[in-house]
Amino acid sequence: MNANHGIDVSIPPSGPGCVECEANGGWWLHLRRCAQCGHIGCCDNSPGQHATAHAQSSGHPVIRSFEPGEDWFFNYPDSAFFAGPELEPPAHHPLDQSVPGPASRVPADWQQRLH
């Protein structure tokens, strides 16, 4: 697959947190950004696993980390990490945002709830 297939560099991220977790009062460990539409979802270690669910339901094949200091892309069909182009800012969630987050919704036993 062409590494740039499924990537639109002009689309900003949907917000600073997982769309579905924000809607249902959940929490996340790490965030992932759909490289095609900007949807922010939580990683596969998070309880909701919303980034992968978004990729499966939308057919959008590529995500990028939405964590500070990480710029990797992942192609679901190929199960491969790769370097990709710069996307519309911001490149990561706010630096003052907790990990896991959001802090007010992370349970005390969060480590036991990870996948």
Image (tube, rainbow, N blue to C red):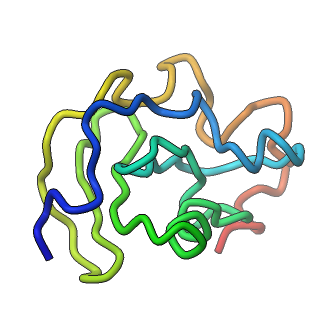
The percent coordinates of residue 95 (x first, y second) are 47, 19
* In-image side of 104 versus 58 (left or right): right
- Asked if residue 87 lies left or right of residue 92, the reply is left
The answer to which quarter of the image holds residue 82 is bottom left
Q: Is residue 113 above or below residue 18?
A: below
Q: Is residue 92 above or below residue 55?
A: above
Q: Split into 4 quadrants, where in the image is the N terminus? A: bottom left
In the figure, is residue 24 to the left or right of 16? Answer: right
- Identify the residue shown where x is 76% and y is 68%: 112
| Residue placed most toward the observer, 34 or 111 | 34
User: Which is more toward the observer, 13 or 22?
Assistant: 13
Q: Identify which residue is drawn at 15% across, 57% down.
A: 4
Q: Is residue 100 above or below residue 90?
A: below
Quadrant in which the C terminus is drawn: bottom right
Residue drawn at 38 percent across, 33 percent down: 11
Q: Position of residue 30 (x, y in %)?
A: 53, 49
Q: Note whether 15 is above or below 83 in the view shown.
A: above
